[in-house]
Amino acid sequence: MRAVLKITIAVVLVLVLALVAAWMADRPGVIAVDWLGYRIETSVGVLIAIIIVLAAVLAALARLALFAARGPRYLAGRRRAKRRQTAERALVRGLVAVAAGDARDAKKQAIAAETATDGSPLSLLLAAQAAQLNGDSGAAERAYKLMLENDETKFLGLRGLIVLARRRGDNDMALAHAREAQALRPGAPWVASEIFGLQAALGEWSAAEETLAGALRHKLIEGAKGKRHRAVVQLGQVDAAIARGDSREALTLAESAHALAPDLVPATTRLARLLADAGKQRKADRLLENAWAHQPHPDIAEVYGAIAPDLPEEERAKRLATLASINPAARESRLLAAEQALVRRQWAEAREALMVLVANSEATRRTYDLLAELERREKGDQRRAAEWQEKAATGESEPRWFCHTCGHTPVKWSPHCPACHSFDSLEWRAPGAISEILPPPAAPADGTVPAADVARATG
């Protein structure tokens, strides 16, 4: 359509010029000019042609002068635009490389972006991420510190420094950076969560509880998560009270923690132990029995047996079998019943409990290990025991405490992961039973490590 319009305009112009030329040819005339003793005579057509040529020459000279005046600025603008395009391309490629975990390309693109932008905030961020991906914490720290010099990127730089400090175990420095970040953005939920997690990691339980209370008042954390956090903080205070020999304070705190999070197994088991130590055996028994009815867990069975240490082995086995009978259909109850039947040499009872799990496709390595033990002890059948043992070697793993931040599997629950010190990050599950969504790599793409995330915890 545009091409047709251009052709039409060109044809019209040619026709107009032809008509003007024809009109002038029908009306010839002479123009004479006397100037400085010279007389110049020419036709009207020639004069018009000369005027047109002079106008074109003057227009060309004017454009040339304008270009000479504006040329350097124009060329500088072109160079800046080219550098900006180069920087944008390097930033995009670098961020893609970070997301893909390509440390080598990320570093290459970070250098290109920094060269093209003379250290813009985005290029510094990419440089820090690339350095973390390459395991160069020194370069990452330098980049984050340069970000502190720009008001727009200071908060992000502090966040990166907090993560680096936590990774090298310097929680005091991390807390100092977190307080500085809080001064910049008091209403940021992440900052409140970070300060809370660091205070808890340092064992500053009272300060952590105050921070949590403030976060709840300002609605920086939801109520259900806040209750869970309070319960875990109080369990940390329970451990501290036990360590200094204050059993009364420990019992009061354990009762409060259990009231806040009755489904938190460690809160139940700690309270039961303290009740038993205080001479309230029957109350401790009822607490554990009620918990088993709703949530059978090996830790509950362990404490249920431990708070009656003076019982003979046979009586202790009967006690644990009674606990298993409270929730007989649960997998953990069948395993506990089978273990106690083996202790009491009740072979048929043990086999029945275990074979139900096999038939229901609920058998785990522990199930097969118990079947192998049953074959050896009941019949002395080493061949059959070996067959069950082979199944145990390839069977599904037992649930265990698992840190959803770093993947560590500690033997016992604690308020912090023993490996990465993340607060309340331990959940009870079988390894591989839950797929993490984008699990944090060695150098997370956003430069963060959760400080107090409990949304996925179930234990």
Image (tube, rainbow, N blue to C red):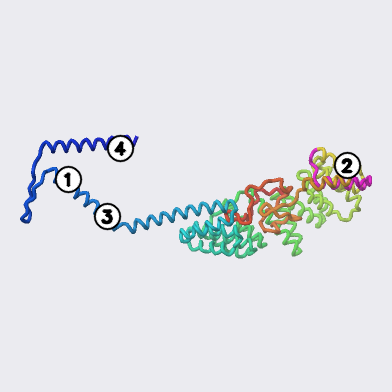
Q: Are marks 4 and 3 in contact (CB under 8 Å)?
A: no
Q: Nearer the viewer, mark 2 or mark 4?
A: 4
**Quick one: SS at disc 4?**
helix
Amino acid type at circle 2 is: Arg
Point out residue 284 in the picture as x, y percentages from the top left corner.
Answer: 80, 51
- Can residue 438 be seen? yes
- The structure residue drawn at horizontal position 88% and vertical position 51%, both measured from the top left corner, is 316
Instruction: Please tell me whether residue 242 is drawn above or below residue 346 in the rendered image.
Output: below
Q: CA distance from mark 2 to mark 4?
A: 94 Å
Q: Which callout, 2 or 4, points at the residue further toward the start of the chain?
A: 4
Mark 4 — residue? Answer: 6
Amino acid type at circle 3 is: Leu
Q: CA distance from mark 4 to mark 3?
A: 28 Å
Q: CA distance from mark 3 to mark 1?
A: 23 Å
- Looking at the rendering, which quadrant does residue 448 occupy? bottom right
Q: Which callout, 4 or 3, points at the residue further toward the start of the chain?
A: 4
| Magenta run includes residue 380 | yes
Counting other residues with Cα less than 10 Å from the Cα at mark 4, is it few (<14), some (14-19), or many (20 or more)? few
Q: Nearer the viewer, residue 326 or 33?
A: 33
Q: CA distance from mark 2 to mark 1?
A: 116 Å
Q: Which callout, 2 or 1, points at the residue further toward the start of the chain?
A: 1
Q: Main secondary structure of the magenta part?
A: helix
Point out residue 270 in the picture as x, y percentages from the top left corner.
Answer: 76, 55
Q: Nearer the viewer, mark 3 or mark 2?
A: 3
**Quick one: SS at disc 2?**
helix
- The structure residue drawn at horizontal position 26% and vertical position 53%, both measured from the top left corner, is 63
Mark 1 — residue? Answer: 49
In magenta, the rendered stretch is: 360-383
- Looking at the rendering, which quadrant does residue 206 occupy? bottom right
- Looking at the rendering, which quadrant does residue 238 occupy? bottom right
